[in-house]
């Protein structure tokens, strides 16, 4: 008997595109389709993830990139893979695409980031949400700045451009990428489009539960 491994889905995009509301809608959509879904986030809720999140405004560049990667490897080992191995689908709020954008905006070269994350688990589907820079800036202004990047008025446009570039980088690495514009669509509409794009769960090689005992000659 074989067990299907769960799907690993990541959602990334500039601040203000509606990732959190989309993830909630996606969890509901997939649950209604009969799938067991687990939500998670990066930086993770572990000690290293909490430290990274709490200090992201004061730790910059290479040091922050290394903290994010260290948290990611631990996150994969202790949370993501155990859920996937039981057949659950995991939805992660921010993952490798955010690294390839935010850490580059922080001055870290793409080549360094790719090398640092060379052994991570790649998603079965990487969703990148986008919107017009003007709309993103408006949403950030309404809810207030939550990160040092939000203080830079040019940041929404730079983020949008880098996420577009990152989508192509991931595709070149054979990652299935879905780019969706959230400017006009509702989270429910986007969730349905993501669910429709999901690949079939993978099936690991079967291992007989009770291997036959060798017969005496």
Image (cartoon, rainbow, N blue to C red):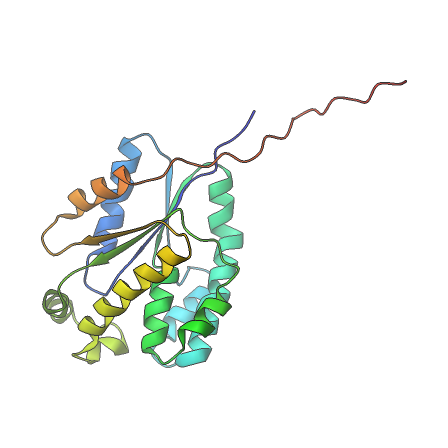
Estimate the x, y position of residue 113 in percent, counting from the top left.
44, 70
Depth check: 97 or 87 in front?
Answer: 97
Depth check: 25 or 189 in front?
Answer: 189
Depth check: 147 or 135 in front?
Answer: 135
Task: Name which quarter of the figure residue 110 lies in.
Answer: bottom left
Please give the name of the residue rendered at 52% of the width and 52% of the height, measured from the top-left corner: 78
Task: Name which quarter of the figure residue 98 lies in.
Answer: bottom left
Answer left or right for 199 relative to 158.
right
Estimate the x, y position of residue 151 in percent, counting from the top left.
20, 80
User: In the picture shown, does residue 41 fall above or below 141?
Assistant: above
Estimate the x, y position of residue 199 in percent, counting from the top left.
36, 39
Depth check: 125 or 19 in front?
Answer: 125
Please give the name of the residue rendered at 40% of the width and 80% of the height, measured from the top-left corner: 61
Does the rendering let one see residue 152? yes
Name the quarter where the N terminus is drawn: top right
Name the quarter where the C terminus is drawn: top right
Answer left or right for 8 relative to 213.
left
Estimate the x, y position of residue 123 in percent, counting from the top left.
41, 50
């Amino acid at each position: 008997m074989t067990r299907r491994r769960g799907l690993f889905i990541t959602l990334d995009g500039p601040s203000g595109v509606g990732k959190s509301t989309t993830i909630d809608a996606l969890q509901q959509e997939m649950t209604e389709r009969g799938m067991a879904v687990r939500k998670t986030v990066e930086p993770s809720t572990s000690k290293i993830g909490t430290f990274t999140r709490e200090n992201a405004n004061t730790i910059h560049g290479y040091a922050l990139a290394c903290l994010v990667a260290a948290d990611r490897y631990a996150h994969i080992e202790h949370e993501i893979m155990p859920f996937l191995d039981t057949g659950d689908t995991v939805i992660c709020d921010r993952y490798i695409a955010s690294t390839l954008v935010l850490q580059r905006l922080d001055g870290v070269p793409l080549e360094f980031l790719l090398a640092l994350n060379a052994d991570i688990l790649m998603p079965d589907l990487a969703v990148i949400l986008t919107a017009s820079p003007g709309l993103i800036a408006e949403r950030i202004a309404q809810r207030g700045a939550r990160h040092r990047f939000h203080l830079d008025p040019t940041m929404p446009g730079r983020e949008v451009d880098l996420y577009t570039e990152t989508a192509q980088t991931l595709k070149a690495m054979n990652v299935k990428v879905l780019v969706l514009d959230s400017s006009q669509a509702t989270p429910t509409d986007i969730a349905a489009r993501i669910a429709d794009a999901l690949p079939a769960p993978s099936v690991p090689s079967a291992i007989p539960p009770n291997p036959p005992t060798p017969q005496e000659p």
